[in-house]
Amino acid sequence: MIELIELNKSFDDIKAVNNVSLKISDGEVFGLVGTNGAGKSTILRTIAGVYKPDSGIVCVDNRPVYDNPDVKKDIFYISDEQYFFPNCTPEDLADFYGTVYDNFDKQRFFDMLNGFMLDKSRKVNTFSKGMKKQVSILLGLCAGTKYMLCDETFDGLDPVVRQGVKSLFAAEMSDREFTPVIASHNLRELEDICDHVGLIHLGGVILSEDVSDMKVCMQKVQCVFASEEDESKALEGLDVLIHDKRGRLHTITVRGEREHVEKSFKRGEMIFFEVLALTLEEIFISETEVVGYDIRKFIMG
């Protein structure tokens, strides 16, 4: 488990991370969401031990990370601003990472390069941005670490490669102890892969929730009521988060399990009624507006 307790980090007068507390459980895909400048990269670099916290605690499996090489061997960090040795090839990188990570599987790395049609002898500085990202991801998977920290991992990847990487993550998690932490500014990229999502804004955590729990405990209803009286009957006692009306069509987001919500709406007469699936973005919009934030102002999609 990765645990952050009241973590703070500043750069001169800029508060990059503000009293952040998070728990990232083993064996789940954790999504760290927020705009550029929200503090995601600083949090990942602090977890990786690149930055020393100003205050607070960062522990991996109950061990402090900073200045602790034994712990860092369990972590592979992929920066959004990737750096490669001048004129190096993927083969050179495999030799280097083989000296850093005891379990680095060089042959597997070469096999995976072939699968992604990447030449192990070609200089990395001639690769496109997406190809460089693929090399970094494959290095991380073949390092055999328990934790993989990915900053904007899918940025620059085409849809086919993106789906392939997600499949590799899923296979890795089924084969061994493996926990990816994925930072992104785009909720839609994380929709079909994350088990748990934390929303970061201005260096602080607005929300950290299990995705499946959020989807079970929130419903979006579209309906047309027979009358205003029927609308009042249906909504009485419900925890309504968002209620939009266009003409006679109501779109209502309600907190509660589906069975309870459907039973409540049956108290009023309706001309039309339908329960729709919520996207991760819609869930976060609903949750954050309740606590006074409009996520649409700072989450890009």
Image (spheres, grey):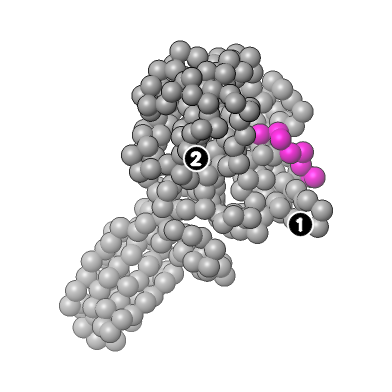
Kindly identify the amino acid type of the residue bearing the numbered disc 2.
Lys
The image shows residue 8 at horizontal and vertical percentages of 74, 49
Residue most extreme to the left:
271
Residue shown at 59% from the left, 37% from the top: 82
Q: Toward the viewer: 110 or 20?
A: 110
Kindly state the secondary structure of the residue where label 1 is placed.
strand
Kindly state the secondary structure of the residue where label 2 is placed.
helix
Label 1 belongs to which residue?
Answer: 14
The image shows residue 253 at horizontal and vertical percentages of 37, 67
In the image, 38: left or right of 220?
right
Q: Toward the viewer: 84 or 60?
A: 84
> Crowding near pointer 2: few (<14 within 10 Å), some, many (20+)?
some
Q: Quadrant of residue 247?
A: bottom left
Residue shown at 36% from the left, 24% from the top: 115
Q: Toward the viewer: 111 or 263?
A: 111
In the image, 142: left or right of 250?
right
Mark identifier at residue 227: none
Residue shown at 43% from the left, 47% from the top: 190
For the N terminus, the quadrant is top right
The image shows residue 2 at horizontal and vertical percentages of 61, 35
Residue most extreme to the bottom:
228
Label 2 belongs to which residue?
Answer: 129
The image shows residue 10 at horizontal and vertical percentages of 77, 51
In the image, 34: left or right of 256?
right
Q: Which residues are magenta?
A: 48-55
Q: Quadrant of residue 85?
A: top right
Kindly identify the amino acid type of the residue bearing the numbered disc 1.
Ile
Residue 179 can be seen, yes or no: no
Say above or below: 27 vs 218. Answer: above
